[in-house]
Image (spheres, rainbow, N blue to C red):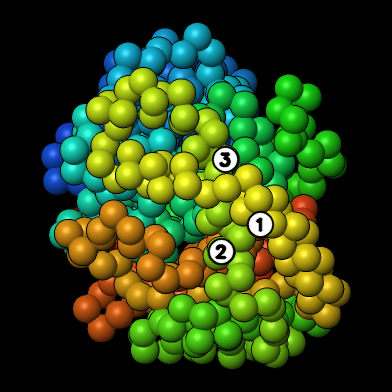
Amino acid sequence: MAEIPTIAEAAALIAARKLSPVELTRACLARIERLNGTLHAFIKVTPERALAEAKAAEAAIAAGGSKGPLHGIPIAHKDIFETKGLATTAHSKVLIDHVPQADAVAVAKLAEAGTVMLGKLATHEFAWGGPSFDLPFPPARNPWDPQRFTGGSSSGTGAAVAAGLALAGTGSDTGGSIRGPSHYCGVTGIKPTYGLVSRRGILPLAYSLDHAGPLAWTVEDCAILLQAMAGHDAQDPGSADVPLPDYRAALAGSLKGVRIGFVRQFHESGNPANDAVKSALEAALPVFRSLGAEVRDAELAPLADWHACGMLIMMCEAFALHAPWLRTRPQDYGDYMRDRLRLAAFVSAADYIEAQRARRELCRQFAATMREFDLLISAVMPSEAPLIEEMGKWASFERPSLTFPYNVTGAPALALRCGFTAAGLPLGMQIVGRPFEESLVFRAGHAYERATSWASRRPALAN
């Protein structure tokens, strides 16, 4: 295949009998064979399984048994999503021999929708410790420039989707781990509302902040994927029992009269962005106005408050999860994860309780702001992808995170392209909505994407 199709494009071609799921899967496997040695996006490729699933999908579709737009679509899973009979290592020596007996709920739902599994994708160790170079597998590399960072922790997913190794992949997001790779790798990712997608079978980092969602090339593709992934799970204590709208159908709505708040303070004073990011964000505003939206500045609590709250909660909950292994098997962790957990050991119960109290107040303020606005726009990262060698152990502690606020609130946040640097590196923005209003978030992202040309650019490596 000369060009990499989106999920929506591939589904239409498959339905019209103009594209075979087997042909599509072979094309992805060939691209993995050609590029994964450079990108390290996959830590395990399953070609026999993928081709068997593709052949089964092709036969079922030919017999009139199509399961919908994901039937026959090749995807891959971040290696904290448990896969039955296939090692799920969290990119760590600690779990190097861990072979689950069941699929994660999200994995099972996507399989039921007809997806073809290509394999398991690189992550940061236990979704926090990276990019560390002393792990069983190398860190993923950015397809726009393999010397650069992918973002984390859904690092392999961002790289695989950007390079067309898979049409989509799963990700988790505790402090920005779907949105960071989306920004740096120039793809689209949605951190859904907390509890919309079951986390059962996904190796946890911080129970009260963990989200799961998809990364793909377009907003429409993310809507298709979220439709399959979302839903109540009575066995996940954090799962929300809410009605599911038709996310794809909602894309066609108008933005006329939609009130959008621009959270300028975060990237201008909280974590100052470079000129390229600022310019890209400013240039997005008239596009939304041209689509009928009302856009004006919005004010939230200082970014440092959001970051301190989210980071303290994450550190405490991560330490609680890892303390038994850290005491008995510290040598099996990579340097980055081990030392971050050791630091977390010194955070007190009083600190954790105060962080949770602060969280309630921050969420109250956010809810008040969202009575004035339907959506918010804010930065994802303060720059384009940095060189991977510059990502030190304490990089995520040095400046407040632009993504953490929406983990603290649990609100849906979509990351998508909004420009490129002069050197051709992608830049992104976040579109944030009220809890469970993914439909409006998707509608705004889709309208912006259709009104701009950013999605037409792929990394040269992928050609």
Q: Residues within 10 Å of mark 1 (few under 14, many from 20)?
A: many
Q: Few, some or many C-alpha atoms within 10 Å of disc 3 (few <14, some 14-19, many ≥20)?
A: some
Disc 1 target residue: 355
Identified at 73% across, 22% down, the residue is 235
Q: CA distance from mark 2 to mark 1?
A: 8 Å
Q: Earlier in the sequence, mark 2 or mark 1?
A: 2
The type of residue carrying mark 2 is: Ala
Q: Which mark is residue 153?
A: none
Which residue corresponds to the image point at 36% horizontal and 84% vertical from the top-left?
A: 274
Tell me: residue 273, above or below residue 348: below
* Numbered badge on residue 317: 3
Under mark 3, the amino acid is Glu
- Determine the residue positioned at 56% across, 54% down: 312
Q: Secondary structure at mark 3?
A: helix
Image location of residue 69, percent across then percent down? 58, 38
Considering only vertical position in the picture, is 43 above or below 429? above
The label on residue 308 is: 2
Q: Secondary structure at mark 1?
A: helix
Residue type, mark 1 in image? Ala
Q: Where is residue 357 shown, x and y percent of the image? A: 75, 57
